Image (cartoon, coloured by chain):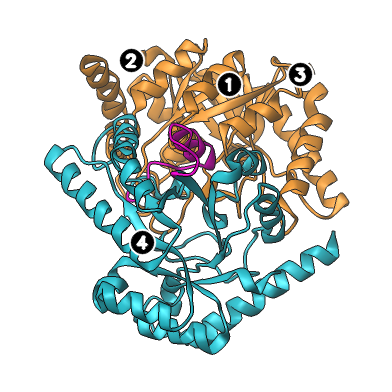
Chain colours: A cyan, B orange
Amino acid sequence: VDLARLSFNQYTCKPWSLEQAVAACVKREIPAIAVWRDKIAEAGLPRAVAMVRDAGLRVSSVCRGGFFPSPDAAERARRLDDNRRAIEEAAALGAPSLVLVCGPAEGQPLADARAQVRDGIAALVAEAAAAGVRLAIEPLHPMMISERSVIASLEEANALAEHFPADAVGVIADVYHIFWDAFVEREIARAGSRVSGFHVSDWSTPTGDVTADRAMIGDGCIDLANLHDAVRRAGYGGDVEIEILNARAWNGGDLDAWLDTALQRYAAAGTATTASR
Amino acid sequence: VDLARLSFNQYTCKPWSLEQAVAACVKREIPAIAVWRDKIAEAGLPRAVAMVRDAGLRVSSVCRGGFFPSPDAAERARRLDDNRRAIEEAAALGAPSLVLVCGPAEGQPLADARAQVRDGIAALVAEAAAAGVRLAIEPLHPMMISERSVIASLEEANALAEHFPADAVGVIADVYHIFWDAFVEREIARAGSRVSGFHVSDWSTPTGDVTADRAMIGDGCIDLANLHDAVRRAGYGGDVEIEILNARAWNGGDLDAWLDTALQRYAAAGTATTASR
């Protein structure tokens, strides 16, 4: 476990401002942070840039662009413009990647929505490359297909990314979204240099909000060390984001303790599994 | 839409006994039924056989066998014996297929559980073939991996089935479980003559019980006609099971109206989509 490559995805402690999230990194000597656009907007981009720079933090990614599909062409154009602002924010923050959440279908057939995702990425790819920001397609768990992402597997994300140059369009390997796939190691290897992020949490079946019911590392059934090995074998040497979206932690939980536990569990998961193999 | 190939999966109206489910088929001239083992046990096998025979119904499948993985070898052996009884019941009822739900992992690594599923099927395949019952692997939606099935995609089910003769081991195409897959048509074509059942319902994101929160046909985002075409192109000419597991319908809903609506929606879904293409 390489703590020098650890990143705190700030939605793990969503109620915190960017300022609080940055302070939490500094206090714990976490060297990187993944920032969300609503938090950037809250702080203002120049102040956000100054905060992470002054704290000496890397920004592992900006969350998130995407949301391309709409039956309305004018709405699709507005969303492209919003993605352009997201690319600018990522570039200003020095983030190598802009995470793309690619959906939902908005009442259209899945095939149509998927075509609009591809068109949306195609429209942005030159601008993103010029800005030095990689568009990172994040496949979400298939249970989120109706309200969040029509890209539902790493295989699908790879097939989509392969329409574009590897340095311009990559994929995110988030264990929560992809661990269930019997062929996940094949697809991580296939992604190779396109792997643009590795996000960690754990899985227990959601009982309410499918987005924010992720388990603490070690409390679910994900073989984290195995997936971590797979992304390393694929050549990924970037930051590992702790991203544990959990509404119970957000609503009155002790967020400092939540983050501390995540750090301890992350370190333990790597050690324990290495020992057991 | 071929109503001559329609089957009523009785868990659509789970609170009904087998006797009530058979009567519901006769009343509506539904020519086939899918029966569950708890309902067979309730009626007793000889009486269950007599009921469906006297009503002139085909039995499209028996639900369900499987549940092979366990860290305890003696428990795995007990479950194989239970599967042997399920094969006998399917044979006695004249069902061409026994549906297999292949999980959960019971605390083991997914890879170990998946190996036990393969071993379990291997142990049964000769007996099932001798009884004239095909073992039909049903991949479940990836959100059910933790408590129900480690076989989470049609690609995985196909790869598993291909270890065995096609007439002995098939796969179930249940739209609720597989519709999200961008490569589902490829995998249905690959399954070809192994397609052993086609189950219909609709998808809206579960908000509670992930097993029994299926949407009424037409109330979700599944392109039913497209998937139906895909199984037909694969050569499937067997029964189409209406299987809409929904706890709200079961708990105080009007089950006759639920089934009537499903029949109407099924007929309309085929017609509407054929017209729109």
Residue type beneath disc 4:
Ala
Q: Amino acid at mark 3?
A: Ala
- Secondary structure mainly formed by the magenta segment: loop
- Identify residue type, mark 1: Ser
Chain bearing mark 4: A
**Quarter of the image containing the N terminus of chain B?**
top left
- Residue at disc 1, secondary structure: strand
Asked if the magenta segment contains residue A163, the reply would be: yes
Q: Nearer the viewer, mark 1 or mark 3?
A: 1
Residue drawn at x 68%, y 28% is B159
User: Which span is picked out in magenta?
Assistant: A147-168
Are discs 4 and 3 located on one and the same chain?
no
For mark 1, what is the residue? Answer: B196
Name the mark nearer the viewer: 4 or 1. 4
Say left or right for A111 vs B68: left
Disc sitting over residue A90 in the figure: 4
Return the disc, 2 or 3, that comes first in the chain's sequence. Answer: 2
> Where residue B1 is drawn, which disc sits there?
2
Depth check: give the residue in front, A16 or B36.
A16
